Image (cartoon, rainbow, N blue to C red):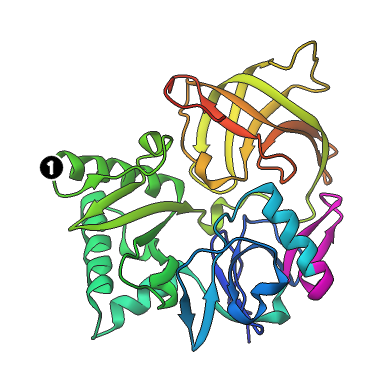
Amino acid sequence: MNLDWWTPRDGDIMVTGEGFIFYAFGYEHPPSRVVAFLKYIPAGLAHLFPLEYLDTRWRLLGEELLRPKSLYTAENYRKMVEAFRRHLPQYIYRCPMRNKEIICIPTKSVDRVYTPNRCLRELLERTHLDELQRTAVELVSLLSDESGVPLEDFGIHGSIALGMHHEGSDIDIAVYGSTNFRRLEAAVERLVGDGVITYAPKEPLDVLRRHRGVYRGVPFVYNAIRKADEIKTRYGERRYTAIRHVRVRCKVVDDGESMFRPATYRVSDVEPLNADMELEGTPSEVVSMIGAYRNVVRRGDEMEASGMLEWVEHLKTGRIHYRVVVGSGISEREYIKPIKFAGYSPH
């Protein structure tokens, strides 16, 4: 497939020659590869992966697909890496910037790419839509009108984008740009106030994120993707070195990149919570690789974070800074806990 038009961004969907469906992760991708996580596995290859699967079956272009029950646990990621290493080693990459093995897809293995903006454009151009597709187009148009965000800055994600939705599928909406996300967030709040849609949190933190709702009986979710000019780092510009697990309390001083994945919170007043522990370097940011912790803490608020303290070297300038990474893939007990949200417990 000719991919000259494509610069991978977080959430872009890739279908490989074997029928795996991967989602691109983040924005730092090695040349001719895409850092990704596995979302759907062809039924005929599921025995290679010692995972628990959902009962639902999906189909794409005649291929039956299974989805793991838990996509984002450290244990399942390790199992996926091991399975690929044994059976399909081309999907494993020893990353010199992270000094570890990661799932990283060679672009030559990609048969098809689905990006949210293109998928929405195709829906808008169709003359025949099923009921869920019509509702999705109607909802995106409503959100565009209410927020003032142009339609070209929206996208459709998930099963509708792939054309393998079924009864019970939700509408997965993408919006490009941090400013557009904040405008959309405010518009959703107004529409909730008007009774046009309702919030529908699934998890405790969803109450803070306010990104899940119901429109005309259909559940929907919206998330943010960086615009091209918001991608500030390229692969090879920074080297990340893990130091050790830490638990800290800190204050958020900038939440302008908290809606993306990875979610970045600039922080100050960092206090270590591990007993008798001093930090090797004071982190200036908390970065979540786990999507559930996007947009959960706002500027001026405090958080507790458990994750991997990393030393970040800027290779062009030699500058060093430290960060706490939540979702390092090593421990299940990594989290962000908004201090103000006393009803939430990560344990």
Please tell me which residue lies in front, 325 or 311: 325
Above or below, 336 against 173 in this view is above
- The 10 Å Cα crowd at callout 1, few under 14, some 14 to 19, many 20 or more, is few
Please tell me which residue lies in front, 171 or 284: 171
Tell me what residue is drawn at x 74 percent, y 58 percent: 79
Please tell me which residue lies in front, 98 or 42: 42
Left/right placement of residue 215 relative to residue 268 reads left
Q: Which residues are magenta?
A: 85-105
Q: Quadrant of the N terminus?
A: bottom right
SS of the residue under disc 1: loop
The answer to which image quadrant residue 187 occupies is top left
Please tell me which residue lies in front, 195 or 88: 88
Tell me what residue is drawn at x 43 percent, y 35 percent: 205
Q: Amino acid at mark 1?
A: Asp
* Circle 1 residue: 194
Image x and y of residue 160, in percent:
38, 71
